[in-house]
Amino acid sequence: MEIFDKLKILADSAKYDASCSSSGSNRKNIDNGIGNGHVSGICHSWGADGRCISLLKILLTNACIYDCKYCINRSSNCVPRATFTSREVADLTIHFYKRNYIEGLFLSSAVIKSPNDTMERLIEVASILRNEYHFHGYIHCKTIPGCSQELIDKLGILVDRLSINIELPSNDSLKLLAPQKEKDGILKPMTYISKAIKVNKIDKSRYKKNFVPAGQTTQLMVGASPETDLKILKLSEKMYQSLKLKRVYYSAYVSVNHDKNLPTLEKPPLLRENRLYQADWLLRFYGFQADELLNEKHPNFNTLLDPKCDWALRNLDKFPIEINTANYYTLLRIPGIGVISAKKIITARREFLLDFESLKKLGVVLKRAQYFITCKGKYFYEVQKFNKNFIETNLLYTERNTIPQKKFEQLSMFDTLLPTKEDTIKCLTGSL
């Protein structure tokens, strides 16, 4: 098979893996090498300066020994199969880089013979790039569940980031939809990588080089199994706390196979994916806990409002908040105020008392914040009353860019629930 025929198959097979993001590491070019890793990021991600960074994102092979029911590459599927040699992947990466198509490599793989055999092939790709081509650009590789710790060590000193996709949020779903995989085979390598990163930061003599300097990530599938948003979010929270993951990615389930154990979905649950990303920001940067955002009575996110607005409406006893006296962490809980604007508020009010016009200039999204704050003890002039029905109805119409009507109860316009443009911006910027 020609190499570009392989590329067509294996690039298309890689599109279901969402767990690639900004690199988070610096790898300087040395000794007249090629490329350099940069903290601004890699392909299909937004850099700190707003750029979309390019990345060669492919599978080493889509010929898999596993028969996971949700996967397009399951062994029982009749699909075109292809396998790159390690040299072919390395050559493609260098050729694409020299043509300025990419700035790094995201390499994953199906399990071709065994976890260890597949890992050895991934290591060979990274070794050719680093040691033969002296490529110092960003490399993100998948760790194959069930592989040996020795192979993780070898790959970890060659790449910037490692990731292992959990995919299914519970052991029951794993047994049902991916019976050949084991929970320990996924969690043990993740735990080992986490500990090795920590040890390497304290004592670099173990590896002689940086071990996975950009940390590790994982991916959870949304909608393939019956777990609630609460279950998924609590799992993410636990991994952030115990494994110190850089990022958990959420992937809306795409119905590519027919199986009695899989749900029949006309469209991927993109709005649900959006809500989980928004909640993920609240966990990582806003000081929220999963149990605050959801509970047994409300196990799934509101389809009409983002998680922060929904939390605020369920906790109106904590509002309104006086903008000139609230501390930083209290400001972060106000809808429409993000991390950057909260810091600006803290700095600006050292000089003068803030009013609503000042907040606009500081980047506060007043169309949400106005219902939950006071400035100098006064409400925003458009806030007619402070009660849940009034606030919720106006927020709903505002979120959908619709002028409020007098009869607030009419909500039939929301039949089609897809992420709005603002939903997408929130997920990219993390500003809630």
Image (cartoon, rainbow, N blue to C red):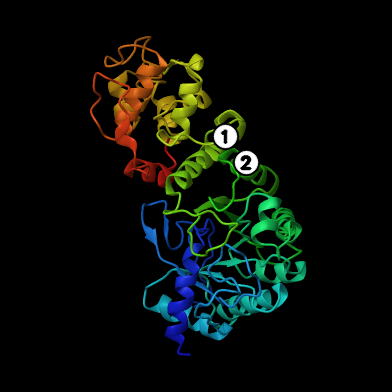
Q: What is the x, y in percent for residue 184?
A: 76, 57
Q: Does dot 2 land on a helix, a strand or a loop?
A: helix
Q: Does dot 1 land on a helix, a strand or a loop?
A: loop
The quadrant in which residue 188 appears is: bottom right
Quadrant where the C terminus is found in the figure: top left
Disc 2 marks a residue whose amino acid type is Lys
Residue lying farthest top?
377
Residue lying farthest front?
260
Disc 1 marks a residue whose amino acid type is Pro
Q: Looking at the image, is 291 positioned above or below residue 247?
A: above
Q: Residues within 10 Å of mark 1 (few under 14, many from 20)?
A: some
- The residue under the point 74% across, 58% down is 192
Residue lying farthest bottom?
1
Q: Looking at the image, is 178 positioned above or below residue 281?
A: below
Q: What is the x, y in percent for residue 107?
A: 54, 70
Q: Are marks 2 and 1 in contact (CB under 8 Å)?
A: yes
Name the side, left or right, on which 41 lies relative to 400: right
Q: Nearer the viewer, residue 282 or 359?
A: 282
The quadrant in which residue 388 appears is: top left
Q: What is the x, y in percent for residue 29?
A: 51, 70
Q: Looking at the image, is 317 positioned above or below residue 213?
A: above
Q: Which residue is mark 2?
A: 231
Q: Which residue is mark 1?
A: 299
Name the side, left or right, on which 75 lies relative to 333: right
- The residue under the point 43% across, 63% down is 43
